[in-house]
Image: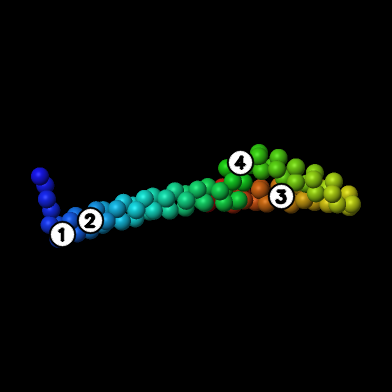
Amino acid sequence: MDTMTTEEQISAIQIERDDARQNLRDTLADVNEKVEQAEGEMRPDHVIESHSVGASLIAGAVGFVFGSIVNSRGAGPIVIAALLGVAIARHGSSDER
């Protein structure tokens, strides 16, 4: 039968605890890396650059909704033009890099 002294049990528990802490640190490092990668992919300028057609459609939808809510007739086209201008400027600046 395997009987351990108190010191051996304490030592085994400490080793197990240290292994668990290291595993937790490794897991947290992996999670942080994945979160940073996801944050980079979800930046608005990156989304606009990689999905320019979708950004244009969203700009049109926002302009349509904004134009239907606001009483001024020129507000909708102004919003569409502004959002498309931002998308084109972001896309153009990424091409220059």
Residue 83 tag number: 3
| Mark 3 crowd level (few <14, some 14–19, many ≥20, 10 Å Cα) | some
Q: Which residue is mark 1?
A: 6
Gap between marks 4 and 2, in whole Å? 53 Å
In the image, is 95 to the left or to the right of 32? right
**Residue 14, how many percent across, how many down?**
23, 58
Secondary structure found at label 3: helix
Give, as a three-letter code, the residue at label 3: Leu
Give, as a three-letter code, the residue at label 1: Thr
Residue 21 tag number: none
Secondary structure found at label 1: helix
**Residue 19, how many percent across, how many down?**
26, 53
Q: Earlier in the sequence, mark 3 or mark 1?
A: 1
Q: Which residue is mark 2?
A: 13
In the image, is 79 to the left or to the right of 5? right
Q: Earlier in the sequence, mark 2 or mark 3?
A: 2
Check contact, mark 2 vs mark 3: CB within 8 A: no
Q: Nearer the viewer, mark 3 or mark 1?
A: 1
